[in-house]
Image: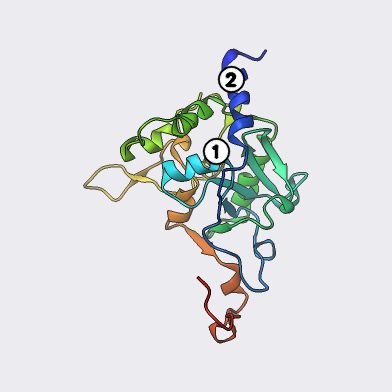
Amino acid sequence: MQGPLDWLGHKLARYLMAPAKHFRPTVVAGGEAHWTDYIEPCDVLLVEGASRVSSAIKYLTQSTWSHAAIWVGDAAPAPLVEADVAVGVAAVPLVKYRDANVRICRPIGLTGDDRVRLIDHIVAHLGDRYDVKNLLDLARYLLPTPPVPARFRRSLITLGSGAPTRAICSSLIAEAFAAVRYPILPVPAAATTSRFRRRAASTYVPRDFDLSPYFAVVKPSIEHRFDYQRFPWAEADTP
């Protein structure tokens, strides 16, 4: 049975998923290389979205990246799995983000067994609902109020319901890596030790995979033997 919070969340979802005005991508993909040729199983795909909710997340996290999906290959009906505001946890085709500004973040050294466990964990959550309570917190950003102080920005995107059948994009992926004990951005267990403890999955945001020292950033243009001497500059610079 749908409660009043779910009803309000879905109403907000329709508004927040609408395109943001005056969106311009921060960078453009160049050359013949394309990210679809270089992504591998368990890679995290970060996306710079163009919707209102994407603008909110980018502001709150002070980052280019507003969304995260994970590559599962043929383990699901489509190769990318994400937690989407409108449909919940679903497998989506490459075409959804083919022309988007994206970044591939690759976990290093995963064993074959852990790759299978990680992907199984993700696929098991297909059909889960998006944590719509999270949308209520995101909506605060869009209201005509003063800017959100920096120390509160992360908390606005992690105040979800915490129900096991609900997720936001980053927490779904963070839970899967936690299941195989792979670090993303752990915190020191104590100031005087070299041991670390895991953060709650709900505290992760898309940019954390970009910042993590345990994920390699894969740039297709560089992987495709980039040669600056052959870069296609225009004959005259344009403003």
Residue 45 in the image: above or below residue 55: below
Disc 2 crowd, CA 10 A, few/some/many (<14, 14-19, 20+) = some
Tag 1 near tag 2, CB within 8 Å: no
Q: How is the image coloured?
A: rainbow
User: Residue 91 at x, y = what percent?
Assistant: 71, 42
* Sequence-earlier tag: 1 or 2: 2
Disc 1 crowd, CA 10 A, few/some/many (<14, 14-19, 20+) = many
Residue 238 in the image: above or below residue 119: below
SS class of the residue under badge 1? helix
Q: In this image, 63 relative to 128: left or right? A: left
Q: Residue at x 65, y 15 (%)?
A: 2
Q: Amino acid at mark 1?
A: Val
Which quadrant holds the N terminus? Answer: top right
- The reply to whether residue 183 is in sight is no
Measured in 3D between alpha carbons, the distance from the residue under mark 1 to the one under mark 2, in whole angstroms, is: 15 Å
The outermost residue toward the bottom is 229
Q: In this image, 105 relative to 74: left or right? A: left
Residue 203 in the image: above or below residue 96: above
Which of these two is toward me, 39 or 31? 31
Q: Residue at x 41, y 41 (%)?
A: 198
Q: Amino acid at mark 2?
A: Leu
User: Residue 205 at x, y = what percent?
Assistant: 47, 43
> Looking at the image, how many numbered discs can be counted on the residues?
2
- The reply to whether residue 43 is in sight is yes
Q: Residue at x 57, y 26 (%)?
A: 132
Task: Kindly identify which residue carries mark 1.
Answer: 53
Q: Give me the disc on residue 129.
A: none
Q: Residue at x 62, y 18 (%)?
A: 7
Task: Kindly identify which residue carries mark 2.
Answer: 8
